[in-house]
Image (spheres, helix red, strand yellow):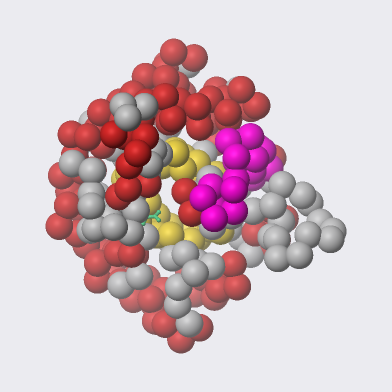
Amino acid sequence: MRRPLVAGNWKMNGSLESVRSLLDGIKAGVGAVTNAEVAVCPTAIFIPEAQQRLSGTEIAWGGQDLSTETSGAYTGEVAASMLNDFACKYVIVGHSERRTYHNESDDLVAKKFATARAAGLAPILCVGETLEERESGVTNEVVARQLNAVIELEGVAALADGVIAYEPVWAIGTGKTATPEQAQEVHAFIRSLVAEKSAEVAEGVRILYGGSMKPGNAKELIGKADIDGGLIGGASLAAEDFLGICTAAN
Ligand code: PEP
């Protein structure tokens, strides 16, 4: 039985004040509403706030990206050891915004997955197709290529140390959600790809859906057999909405 995970990706949002109140709001509400695992990924500079306010609770926190380097002259980058210094459990790798705006290739994302894993962090590997790719009928091909880059580098067993997030790029921040059937189809495909290499890993690995998930559509999405929770952008920035999704994940 896979325990659902609801993870908030706060992206480059918030101020010190708003992040504090969001953390407090989630902390105050979450215990009463969900049995799912809950995590938040603030922008790097606010991770210490998450640690300070969430330590001792059931809520985990993590980063949105990491460097493949361990230290040195890499301006603007964050090392895995730094995420560990602030007790992060998770780190997102290969988010479509990183792939698009920072030209992150499948190979680089696979290396980031490996770097996170080697440091004891649980990578949340994002995969997903653009609208153009969906309309050209290559969704499965794209998702398989993104996933196989990790499997080729690290072996299928490595997936057991992380989480996969299927995030159709056309649904991220657009208000267009994949229907539960559309999402389930790709989730089942991803699980079948993993199962070709290891039935055990396929059975255990959590596959989250991400793309305009909200309290109003979360239950139907997470209710599908292969959807094990959500990676939430916009709706994770308001405690009430995020808690609504956590409730739906019960
Ligand atoms: C995301 O960016 O991971 C995401 C799912 O965003 P949104 O929920 O805003 O579509």
Q: Decide which of 78, 59 is in the foreground and name it.
A: 78
Tally of numbered discs = 0
Query: For this view, does 130 lie left or right of residue 68?
Result: left
- Across and down, in percent, residue 246 comes to 27, 57
- Across and down, in percent, residue 160 comes to 51, 31
In the figure, residue 19 lies in which quadrant? bottom left
The residue positioned 50% from the left and 83% from the top of the image is 16
Is residue 94 highlighted in magenta?
no
Query: For this view, does 163 lie left or right of residue 167?
Result: right
Is residue 106 highlighted in magenta?
yes
Q: Is residue 250 visible?
A: no
The residue positioned 24% from the left and 58% from the top of the image is 175
Give the dominant element type of the magenta stretch: helix, strand or loop: helix
Furthest toward the bottom, the residue is 17
| Image height of 203 relative to 132, above or below | above
Q: Decide which of 229, 31 is in the foreground and name it.
A: 229
The residue positioned 24% from the left and 71% from the top of the image is 240
Furthest toward the top, the residue is 196
Ligand 1 image-quadrant field:
bottom left
Q: Decide which of 13, 129 is in the foreground and name it.
A: 129
The residue positioned 50% from the left and 41% from the top of the image is 125
In the figure, residue 59 lies in which quadrant? bottom left
| Image height of 60 relative to 181, above or below | below
- Across and down, in percent, residue 72 comes to 84, 59
- Across and down, in percent, residue 7 comes to 40, 55
Q: Which image quarter is the N terminus in?
A: top left
Q: Magenta region: which residues? A: 98-116
